[in-house]
Image (cartoon, rainbow, N blue to C red):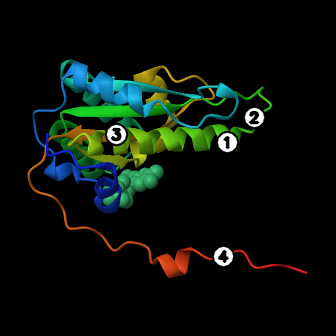
Amino acid sequence: MNKIKNSIDFFATRKSISVKNLKYPGPNQNQTMKILKNALRVPDHGKLEPWRIVLITEDCKKNYISIMEQRGKEINIDPLKIEKSKINLLTAPLIIAVICSPLTDSKIPEIEQVLSCGALCMNVLNNFLANGWGANWLTGWMVNDNELGKLAFNNSKNEFVAGYIYVGSYEETNPDRPRPLIEKKISYYKKKL
Ligand SMILES: Cc1cc2nc3c(=O)[nH]c(=O)nc-3n(C[C@H](O)[C@H](O)[C@H](O)COP(=O)(O)O)c2cc1C
């Protein structure tokens, strides 16, 4: 766990840590739950809580990997991609599957529920980073294949994995990537008519 910054410095410098730079130890159960409790504080129109989280911890990691490998072979995922997924899963001490569970019979549009789930993913990522852990939000074939979500997490018909957040300690950090130019991305509304 690295040094904790004040919130202004944190947001000015925050960046994900590549999975290859993640190391053991990961956060223990108490640390994980404390961070996740805060991460659950996300905007949620209609208070539907259209998401849930499954933690893949050390004791069950091998089991998830074997389900992932079997499913990957079944649907002809490139063996190199399966191996890469396995290496990522073995490298990170903690993997967090964020599952989107939109209600289809709600007056709140599904897109807003999915956006709330995206906000949750970001909040999980940022809360681990803010607490001095390394973390990275990845998707790829393990997300795109809904059947894997059903097999591993008992996802219902409406549910899908929004992302996997890989968490661990780190020493090395990857260089920062180019960041958006404020003048290209932000403008003032101009009067119309
Ligand atoms: C929804 C989503 C899915 C992503 N999936 C992948 C992925 O599968 N593989 C990858 O290399 N990067 C993926 N990325 C990008 C990584 O999270 C990347 O490390 C991130 O852009 C770092 O940004 P940050 O430093 O601002 O946190 C994804 C990003 C998002 C938002």
* Mark 3 and mark 1: Cα distance apart in space: 22 Å
* Mark 1 and mark 2: Cα distance apart in space: 7 Å
| Viewer-side label of 3, 4 | 4
Tell me the residue that label 2 is attached to.
Answer: 108
Asked whether, in this view, residue 156 is left or right of residue 98, the answer is right
Label 4 CB-ligand 1 distance < 8 A: no
Q: Nearer the viewer, residue 46 or 79?
A: 46
Q: Nearer the viewer, residue 85 or 136?
A: 136
* Mark 3 and mark 4: Cα distance apart in space: 31 Å
**Which residue lies at the image location 14% right of the left edge and 39% below the top edge?**
1
* Mark 1 and mark 4: Cα distance apart in space: 25 Å
Tell me the residue that label 4 is attached to.
Answer: 188
Locate residue 83, reporting x and y percent. Answer: 22, 45
SS for dot 2: loop
For label 2, the crowd category at 10 Å Cα-Cα, with few meaning under 14, some 14 to 19 and many 20 or more, is some
Tell me the residue that label 3 is attached to.
Answer: 127
SS for dot 3: helix
Image quarter for residue 187? bottom right
Residue type at mark 2: give it.
Ile
Image quarter for residue 63? top left
Residue type at mark 1: give it.
Glu
Locate residue 95, reporting x and y percent. Answer: 29, 34
SS for dot 1: helix
Residue type at mark 3: give it.
Asn
| Viewer-side label of 2, 4 | 4
Pointer 2 or 4: first along the chain = 2
The reply to whether callout 3 and callout 1 are in contact (CB within 8 Å) is no
131 w.r.t. 188: above or below: above
**Which residue lies at the image location 52% right of the left edge and 24% below the top edge?**
155
For label 1, the crowd category at 10 Å Cα-Cα, with few meaning under 14, some 14 to 19 and many 20 or more, is some
The reply to whether callout 1 and callout 4 are in contact (CB within 8 Å) is no
